Amino acid sequence: MSPADALDNLSIELPSWAFGNSGTRFKVFSTPGTPRTVEEKIADAATVHRLTGLAPTVALHIPWDAVDDYPALGAYADDLGVRLGTINSNTFQDEDYRFGSLTHVEKKVRQKAVDHHLECVEVMNETGSRDLKIWLADGTNYPGQGDIRRRQDRLTESLAAIYEHIGANQRLVLEYKFFEPALYMTDVPDWGSAYAHVAALGERAVVCLDTGHHAPGTNIEFIVAQLLRLRKLGSFDFNSRFYADDDLIVGAADPFQLFRIMFEVIRGGGLDAGSGVALMLDQCHNVEAKIPGQIRSVLNVQEMTARAGLVDTEALTEAQESGDVLAANAVFMDAFYTDVRPRLARWRTDRDLPEDPMAAFARSGYQQQVDAERVGGPQSGWGA
Amino acid sequence: MSPADALDNLSIELPSWAFGNSGTRFKVFSTPGTPRTVEEKIADAATVHRLTGLAPTVALHIPWDAVDDYPALGAYADDLGVRLGTINSNTFQDEDYRFGSLTHVEKKVRQKAVDHHLECVEVMNETGSRDLKIWLADGTNYPGQGDIRRRQDRLTESLAAIYEHIGANQRLVLEYKFFEPALYMTDVPDWGSAYAHVAALGERAVVCLDTGHHAPGTNIEFIVAQLLRLRKLGSFDFNSRFYADDDLIVGAADPFQLFRIMFEVIRGGGLDAGSGVALMLDQCHNVEAKIPGQIRSVLNVQEMTARAGLVDTEALTEAQESGDVLAANAVFMDAFYTDVRPRLARWRTDRDLPEDPMAAFARSGYQQQVDAERVGGPQSGWGA
Amino acid sequence: MSPADALDNLSIELPSWAFGNSGTRFKVFSTPGTPRTVEEKIADAATVHRLTGLAPTVALHIPWDAVDDYPALGAYADDLGVRLGTINSNTFQDEDYRFGSLTHVEKKVRQKAVDHHLECVEVMNETGSRDLKIWLADGTNYPGQGDIRRRQDRLTESLAAIYEHIGANQRLVLEYKFFEPALYMTDVPDWGSAYAHVAALGERAVVCLDTGHHAPGTNIEFIVAQLLRLRKLGSFDFNSRFYADDDLIVGAADPFQLFRIMFEVIRGGGLDAGSGVALMLDQCHNVEAKIPGQIRSVLNVQEMTARAGLVDTEALTEAQESGDVLAANAVFMDAFYTDVRPRLARWRTDRDLPEDPMAAFARSGYQQQVDAERVGGPQSGWGA
Amino acid sequence: MSPADALDNLSIELPSWAFGNSGTRFKVFSTPGTPRTVEEKIADAATVHRLTGLAPTVALHIPWDAVDDYPALGAYADDLGVRLGTINSNTFQDEDYRFGSLTHVEKKVRQKAVDHHLECVEVMNETGSRDLKIWLADGTNYPGQGDIRRRQDRLTESLAAIYEHIGANQRLVLEYKFFEPALYMTDVPDWGSAYAHVAALGERAVVCLDTGHHAPGTNIEFIVAQLLRLRKLGSFDFNSRFYADDDLIVGAADPFQLFRIMFEVIRGGGLDAGSGVALMLDQCHNVEAKIPGQIRSVLNVQEMTARAGLVDTEALTEAQESGDVLAANAVFMDAFYTDVRPRLARWRTDRDLPEDPMAAFARSGYQQQVDAERVGGPQSGWGA
């Protein structure tokens, strides 16, 4: 794939919840202009897309974004130039899920959780979404608290019950996470577990790789390459981290890691047309402004994709095959060290996009407008 | 010190907030019977002490536990058989502290944070508390966000302003934390930083070691030994962890680590009369019952202290000095592997305490009583 | 399974190389009495078995333990009361393997590495060993150095070439490792990769879990439960760690973790007759005496197995199913906190084994004898 | 400081041992042309300096580089255009140090280790070196093996005995390390411990920060800022890591981290004339070519210093003080993302240095020459 194609095939889904308030267990700081409705979130997302040309779809979270009329919501989004994307379920906020959802010891609670996913599929049928993303918060906090093995067996059964309702053009996307909110054992803690489950389910079940959901030191680009090889990489949740699941702006903590990931995505065909690899953000703007936070994020992904696309793969292969470690590394680093920003500015102006989307947003007055308009009523957050 | 003395000198302070609701950024589950007032928290803490004989004091958090009449609160506690202990300040929930408190760029905000601590000293003067504990939540989320060096300089200045008001029989106790809520840089991230600050302040400034506030793999008992050597170990915040600052029940994740820590505490004189090392819990009972969670915790500390007290230090020294690694390790492990529970049951019955405090609590009907009584009004949590 | 059955089904394979010298990249300290030949290693291993009744087999490493006449070596072992066990290959010491073995870019080097494994199968045919264990040291040190994806493809091909020669009663056991000796990318870094490879190979290919080969914080007992569920847990390499692949005595760093692992082994049928789960040590006695180091190790596994066998699974299930977190944890911990050593002393005396194997070894004079006899000639180590 | 000054003040010391063979505990691969003598190492180091203008000094390791006539060695170096630099002691390879050196239980062994350092001071007196670097390998592998506290006390005493002999223009530089070769407890494991020791010793005792010697997730630039504030940052050992103390080429694993570190070095005055902060490499070229590995390393430091020097500190401060997180981060990242390589090529040609030192080395025929000349005799490595 040519670097230009890689850039042109790049599209990044924004999560509706990135525009709402978020924080840590210690405090959720609020900001003026925060959306109060899903429509306001979509309007913010559309603004990001209008300025960058990179973010044509918006992921919804059910029930946070539940509405009565999804076709109307879809039409609203269309009018703003974006489409509704992945549907994300919620297995972590109902009081019944204190001890698990799809893995719960009680059949009644598992059924409730399965039913919630079937409702999500209903939503997908109305929104035309392809992907049902399941990030399973289930787990335990203390050794002995749960039966690790039986929980896996129940998960298998619950996932199968959901998968049955996944349509021919839909996919079940199973996300894994190292820890949190569970603090001792998480029921889908690693890519191996997610892979084993989706392989058992069938072709329309794939894995979601959240870049923040790994143990310290994990080589994430290896997992990208491995899942692409196994044809089970369904999507990314992009963000970055220094410590745990920090949900910082993608590329902010380790841009070189993002470069390596995008290199493997391209190398494994993940940006080819029809690859089925969806790129999505999943971040929390705890202290920074949210809309520019999302603009910065999609630009970071674009920049590292552009750099990854510059790797001279012929020279790389030659150095690799001759065992010249430093030459191979140099080819790789040369691409990373190249400043692609002028090139991307041109890419934008060629497409009637603002040369500098961050500056364009600041100039646009959009923030001031929503600060003034969005007054009264509870701001969106993870709780609503 | 004899093992019996170690046990008799053991007292563990309970944090009032352990009895309120807590959780993760994803969800705070609530439970019936959760206290709504500081008095109800103290009543729960007193129950733990009544059943274990181990927890004679209760730490308060300002403003969560602020009242108009501290002498009256002290009298209330006395009536229940406990005393008010450490005063904990709060630098993480005021909207003004979004970008820091004692380190904030604006003098006005720093002064506000300093003043908050002076109010805490006022509370201490009324409650007779010895320790002002400062866990500083300040930090930044992104590289470049703050000036690391200037923040240290401002911290130095703010701490000095507080220290000036610390009474002759009071102490400033500075806690360090690896990360969270800040996700890139924390202003007091490690024991070295806390030590450098308290050493600069003076004799009545000491360090608080929270067992959950370290990088993966950190040898905590080494830090215990080092701080005791440097005469700057002021207190512990006990809890346990598998991943980040999980705030699980102390001893639950790695009882052998707790044993090693208590061994160094005893070895370094931390349980000697007048040692000045305060032992406190700092935990979150996210999914388990709170009062029995605290009972379990103090029993865990007692059990590991008892085991640590059993180490045959003479045999240990001999093995160490002869370079017999396996013999030294065996002496150490022999103490850890010894079941001290029958001995501790006798220790309790000798003191007219219930032989099995967990069972005694279950039998007592206390939980049922508070479940029935504590109805209506907002339950206590970290937000109030 | 009854606790007694669990104990009676327990047998632990010793690695021949544990009796040789080992160390870090900084220094390998030597000790008197270190074996110079595979026969001397087997004699040491047989001593461990004679004193503990727990270690009836010895794993060999090729080429370190290569001999001309394997039947004679087997007979020698039989005479000493032990049998030859797993055959371990070596992909990390030939100068040709500097940039990989089974994954090497050059067909010639890959073939050499495949051929080495076929020779190992020949050895197995002569020794009657069931398992060919492949710990693959392949990987890269720098980003860009190797083509991650092509290396996986070449690995797939090489493993298939080896698997073809695995006999009907033999198994290919693939070990994974987080890092070291490769310092950026390891070709089989996690259980998911090992699982994907062995699942593709067939029924006689299984995974080896080395307890020291995981990222910080990894929940190993979860992987044990998962691999048992997937019927792909072939064997363990037991050791313990505080930091990296420290290869310390199993149970020395975190006995509670070993307890949790053994609980999942029992719970998933791993100690049932014919389970196919092989327990092996893989340790380095860098500073401690080697033979007693191995005795201590097998006793540690036995003690934690005995404690795990004491878990009242009925009470545990009841507490788990009623959502009583603290009760479930208490059932679990009660078993861990029980001192099983008197019981195990009886288990030994009932079988005409010494009550205290460590003391019996010290008394036996064996060490003094080998110190005196094994003089001259190079001591065994990793290099020979 | 202007960016140009920062560059002009930059000089990086090369470790003689980087030119010898190194590896992991599994294997040390050798390469043609590897030096056999300290003179050959110095010749290689001089080659790096000749091509880059960045590496005017060479650190020696005693006893690996011990010679009879240091003035002659110094003259030899001078002739090649470099000077002898830091003297590094060795506390990890003598059989007597199996259980420690400066902390050993036996006075005799401690004295031997102290004496070794006094000999190093003698060497310094002859070479004119300023710094005695002590990386202390002491520690223990098992809980109970050593008395943590007494070892600290003995260390204090040993360091004081060495410090007494440190001349008026010399410095004792104490390095800390998280783990390895000790696998449970290291006697100087963190900057806090190193700081406490050097603060107690006096003004001419400072800390060495090796970038690979930290726990996962540690914010190293914070420590840089803190030690500069405390006036105790003596030197750096540069290298990079993904996992443990990988000793990879500095900047190879996380160039953004190196940028952040160099930013704090500049910001804290570490590149000011007379700052006393020495920059040194400490790396192992296990699989890559050694001389170009060192060239690549000093260029990486130079590139990241150049980028760090580009930070618009006025704009940064303004953004920081206005609480504009994204603007502050953008100012910071703008410098990091700028391609400084053309500018540095000019910096070199302005100084009659080759525009591309890596290419110049390849063209020079130096490697071919030493491959041909250095035949016979044992190659240098860590063992000699």
Image (tube, coloured by chain):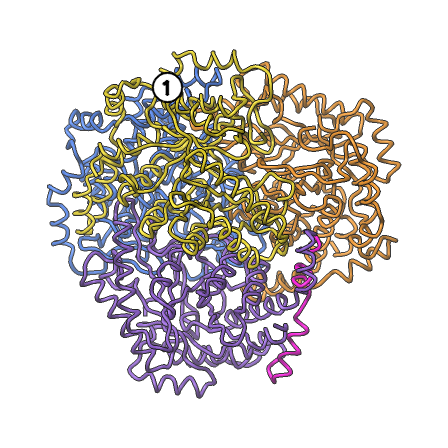
Chain colours: A yellow, B orange, C purple, D blue
Q: Is residue C333 left or right of residue C379?
A: right
Quarter of the rendering occupied by the C terminus of chain C: bottom left
Mark 1 — on which chain does it sit? A
| In this view, C188 is above or below C128 | above
Tag 1: Cα neighbours inside 10 Å, few (<14), some, or many (≥20)? many
Q: Is residue A12 left or right of residue B165?
A: left
Looking at the rendered structure, the kind of residue marked 1 is: Met
Residue C348: say if magenta: yes
Residue C246 location in percent, x, y? 46, 58
Q: Nearer the viewer, residue A32 or C284?
A: A32
Residue D28 location in percent, x, y? 29, 58
Segment tinted magenta in the rendering: C325-354
Q: Is residue B111 left or right of residue D190?
A: right
Tell me which residue sits at (82%, 60%) in the image. B346
Residue D186 visible to the viewer: no
Task: Considering the whole magenta stretch, tell me its main secondary structure.
Answer: helix
Tell me which residue sits at (32%, 22%) in the image. D310
Quarter of the rendering occupied by the N terminus of chain C: bottom right
Residue A26 location in percent, x, y? 60, 31
Residue D280 visible to the viewer: yes
Q: Which residue is mark 1?
A: A358
Tell me which residue sits at (84%, 31%) in the image. B74
Residue B37: say if magenta: no
Q: Quadrant of residue B290?
A: top right
Residue D270 location in percent, x, y? 38, 28
Q: Nearer the viewer, residue B197 or C210?
A: C210
| In this view, A49 is above or below C368 | above
Q: Quadrant of residue C30?
A: bottom left
Q: Is disc 1 placed on a helix, strand or loop?
A: helix
| In this view, D285 is above or below D209 | below
Q: Is residue A147 left or right of residue C43?
A: right
